[in-house]
Image (spheres, rainbow, N blue to C red):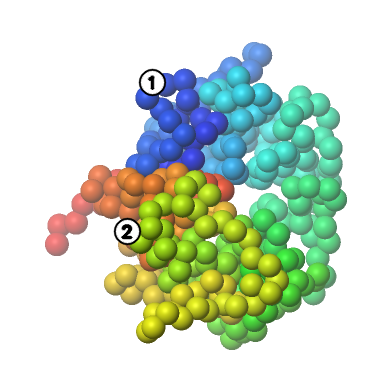
Amino acid sequence: MSWFGFGFNGFGQIIPRARANVGVKVLFPERLESCNCDVGQTRVTRTEKDERLPGEHCCTEIRATWSRRAVVHRQTGDVCISGFVTSPSNQNACTHVPATKGCQDALIGERYLTASFTDKIECWDIGGLGSQPVWRMELTKTDTAALPLAPGGYAFPKTPFYRALAPQICARKLALGTEHAVLLSADGTVYTWGSGSHGQLGHGSVESQLEPLAVEGLRGLPMGDVAAGGWHSVCISAGGDLYVWGWNEAGQLGLPSRCLRAQAEHGSAGEAGCAVVPTRQEAAVTQEGEGSEVFISIQAFPALLDLPEESEMKKMSCGTRHTAAVTCAGDLYTWGWGDYGQLGHGTPRSSDQPLHVEYFTKEGLCVLDVVCGSWNTFVLASERAVSFE
């Protein structure tokens, strides 16, 4: 059972840049190296053999942001960071964070690292990981929610570090986008709030929402998971159907994109792709027709996404402008912006259609989990069981 990574590697968060012939773009899935870092007298060493639990679970979990990757070691309860940590000279090193010893979960951002323990949640400035926490909350033994959820609210990667939620919302999971939040309640209801400038709230408009509001388009359909990208949102129903809404300029919703069609006809628009934030007036125009073709710029209501072979989904994750999902059969599909290879198809191309990442199938691997960084993707996979049928 191993983690793989592909996409943006500008700070060595996938493959150390010190290695020969390693560039900024990792176009094919690469098996991640085991953590092997020294911090004073503390040495953290992991091997794939040690990273197993009974069943289909690995003892390491990955959290990712634009410039770094955090590995949460469940067995020992500590966190290691790869990528940009304190200075460009450290970008090839795996840095162990001693203060996280004994933690149960972690949340990484561009400036802050947050970790939860059995009795507390603490947050540190990544530029000063050896200093005192910038924020701390005491917990009781009954507080078991996963980050960023916290008792009565949630931890946020910028000040104020704690934000309260209405007591009547029984939160099960919370996903934070660039400017919005998507919450899954215990009964399967989806709530959203924050900026709605790209339709990412799913309420049928580009208006913002200060407080959590249930997504009416999903009412009566219990959801099992939620994810938030830069300006788009995704959820999986209890039956494995995938619903998408928000901005689609790079095809991150898996819906027809005029921008990608223009790129295909006139060549790549460069690393920035079509990442032009529309004005409020432009955002109100959600569909553009050209002959019999309809292109989706903004999908302000949840839309059921048609997937190849009517696949049922069990896991998904969102980058800033790309999306990845895992089927119940253990196959990985990706779509959206792909200029750094974050779609895993061996080319720096974007796609507005869900495409099967063939690497894992060809290698006889079953995909168990997927975690998207802003411009990259990390995948947990194990060998497929041999069928004698």
Mark 2 Cα within 10 Å, few/some/many (few <14, many 20+)? Answer: many
Tag 2: residue type? His
Q: Residue at x 78, y 47 (%)?
A: 158
Q: Is residue 118 left or right of residue 255?
A: right
Q: In terms of depth relative to the viewer, which is nearer, 205 or 382?
A: 205
Question: Which residue is disc 1 drawn over?
Answer: 20
- Answer above or below: position of 352 versus 300: above
Say whether disc 1 or disc 2 marks the residue closer to the N-terminus.
1
Q: Where 72 sits versus 99, above or below?
A: below
Q: Position of residue 47 (x, y in %)?
A: 43, 29
Quarter of the picture holding the C terminus = bottom left
What numbered label is drawn on residue 356?
2
Quadrant position of residue 335? bottom left
Image quadrant containing the N terminus: top left
Secondary structure, mark 1, is loop
Q: Residue at x 75, y 71 (%)?
A: 208
Mark 1 or mark 2: which is in front? Answer: 1
* Residue at the image position 72 percent from the left and 56 percent from the top: 149
- Looking at this view, is 5 or 200 the one in front? 200
